Amino acid sequence: MQIILFDTETRNSFYPFSLIRPLSAFRCGIFTTRERWSFVLQQDVFTLTEDHLSAAFSFAEIKEDDYLYINAAAVYSNELLQAVTSLAAEQLLRKNNQLVAVRTKQKLVFPVDQSLLVNCTAVELNAPVRFLQFAFDLVTANDELIRTDIQLIRAKKLSAPISSANNVINPEQVFIEDGAVVEYCSINASSGPVYIGKDVLLMEGTMIRGPFAALDGAVVKMGSKIYGATTVGKKCTVGGEIKNSIFFDYSNKAHDGYIGDAVIGSWCNIGAGTSCSNVKNTAGEVKLWNPLLHQWISAGTKCGVMLGDYSKVSINASLTTGMVSGICSNILTTGLSPKFVKDFTWNIHTGEQYILEKALHDIENWMQMKQQTLTNNDKQILEYIYAQQK
């Protein structure tokens, strides 16, 4: 049986992070959604999404006549796992009329049209299931998924020993992968588990309070103060004060400054001294602008920045509450940032556009610093988005 995670037509709600990736590639907790299902089911998992993303994320498909499609916006749980893997042939699983999963011989296309599934028998999911609806939902789901993921990992392997040089509270809830370097740090896992991935470096004086996850090759600088629920993606470098935030892979916030209740895309760089606001002075409702939906979205009373992939922030910038930045943008300011920055913005004060060739050149420079290169697939995605902007 081939497992396929499908996006729905509502994927525009996850701007800016859905521009260059399907929902299955969102990192929340320790894993991305695709990594989590693959880890649990012990097999390759594929993706059904928009055409311009398919070459980079769909992977070569196995020729089968038995497909299990799972809604990529559904938050993983043991109950959900049991329900979707219990589906018989030509059965679909719903929760309050929302499609959760379907097992069928049909080869579906994006977006999944339920009217084509009339021959499938509908089953109502009795267990609770949570659906991500907006980008900031990743922040609120992160605590739950860090706890879920560390249990999944513990079921398959053992933690490396914790050095006695560290000050650790509740060490039973700390999991360290081989190759990680953790010396003279303070780790408090009493309020949630702490996961330290392979080859992670926690420099001396780092203070961690769970739930927390640092993925393979990440670096946490000396004296950092990080508290849950926070995920630091693969090959990220972080420092200063971070609270309740998610960093996708390969991004930097290496110096002092505060980031809270935020999602930071991949290949972002946040300059020294930069901080974001996550609460309005009025303690009122925070709204985020979504240009694809042409509307303001309520995020409650606490929300930091949603920083699109490949974006850079100057030193000593002040990011306003609920700021949304599109991809490939430069936020070069010493004052308070605007609430919204368009994709491919070179100058936020004049609105000057980032020329595509220059953006690709600069992305290559940043990638070389982490021994990576821009793939043809990634380049084609950026070219497609740039053309759409034009």
Image (cartoon, rainbow, N blue to C red):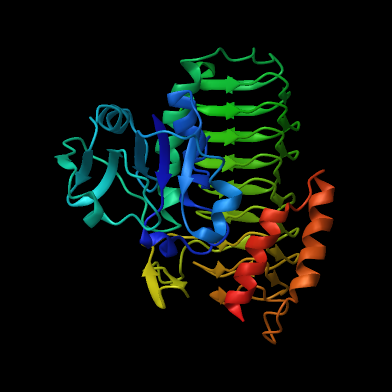
Between 367 and 231, the one nearer to me in the picture: 367
Please give the count of numbered marks on the rendered protein: 0
Between 377 and 204, the one nearer to me in the picture: 377
Image quadrant of residue 145?
top left
Residue name at image x 63 percent, y 48 percent: 241
Image quadrant of residue 59?
top right
Between 129 and 246, the one nearer to me in the picture: 129
- 50 is higher (above) or lower (below) than 292: above
- 177 is higher (above) or lower (below) than 390: above
Residue name at image x 30 percent, y 45 percent: 130
- Residue 301, how many percent across, how many down? 38, 62
Between 237 and 275, the one nearer to me in the picture: 237
Residue name at image x 50 percent, y 54 percent: 261
Q: Quadrant of the N terminus?
A: top left
- Residue 214, how many percent across, how many down? 62, 35
Q: Is residue 115 left or right of residue 3?
A: left
Instruction: Kindly give the residue lying farthest to the bottom in the view shown.
Output: 350
